[in-house]
Amino acid sequence: MKITKKSLINIYRIRNYNTYNNILGEQVDDFFDWFRLKSKKYRFDKDHDAIELPDTFIPELGKCYKNSQYYHFYGSFQYFEGFTSFLENSTRFINHAFNVENTSLKDFTYYYNREEVIRWMGNAPDFHVGIIIPPNIMVEIFENLDIDVEETRTNISLSISLLIAYYIIDSGLDLDIGNFKDPVEDIN
């Protein structure tokens, strides 16, 4: 079965439409168009048995935002947000953050916790789709939320999505990103 990026975004949109609509209101369709235009797709290497971590930081399962933000700020990997997908039986999408180095997917959360992911989901993901969030935008969002970048290394509970805040900034909307709530699933 061949799935296009457009069909993936449409399926993801249906699944998450009400959640995003509650946050963005009339802007929700524009958000999904923006996401569709900016997103990139990366195949997940299921044959990848283990990954060597760049340092001593241990990525926690269920903390993909924190893990990926950490590896961006302290490992110089690009930071992406979007979703990961599992195609077996029925297509499932999970909001997710991951890293990319050059054009290579670096999902430290899943690769380091591979056995737990397979036990939890029944398989490894098939692919990731996401948008790179530029470093200056990440810092701007953290400043608006009164979060020090250092907290991505030290705060165990910090695991926030920046995607909607990035959309708000990138689109020039007059919304207070300091008060937004993003549809982040607890398990990612």
Image (spheres, rainbow, N blue to C red):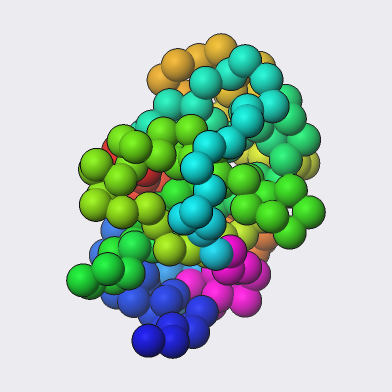
Closer to the camera, 41 or 87?
87
**Image location (x, y in percent) of residue 63:** 42, 32
Q: Residue sitting at 51 percent across and 58 percent down?
A: 44
The answer, for residue 143, to whether it is visible in the render is: no
User: Does residue 3 belong to the magenta stretch?
Assistant: no
**Image location (x, y in percent) of residue 84:** 43, 58
**Number of marks:** 0
Q: Residue sitting at 31 percent across and 36 percent down?
A: 116
Closer to the camera, 43 or 26?
43
Give the quarter of the image for residue 12: bottom left
Kindly report the secondary structure that dominates the magenta region of the rendered protein. helix
Give the quarter of the image for residue 130: bottom right
Q: Is residue 148 above or below residue 95?
A: above
Q: Which residues are magenta?
A: 32-42
Horizontal side of residue 12 vs 112, given as left or right? left
The answer, for residue 35, to whether it is visible in the render is: yes
Q: Residue sitting at 50 percent across and 54 percent down?
A: 47
**Image location (x, y in percent) of residue 49:** 50, 42
Horizontal side of residue 186 vs 158, given as left or right? left
Closer to the camera, 71 or 114?
114
Quadrant that contains the C terminus: top left
Quadrant that contains the N terminus: bottom left
Q: Residue furthest left?
A: 89
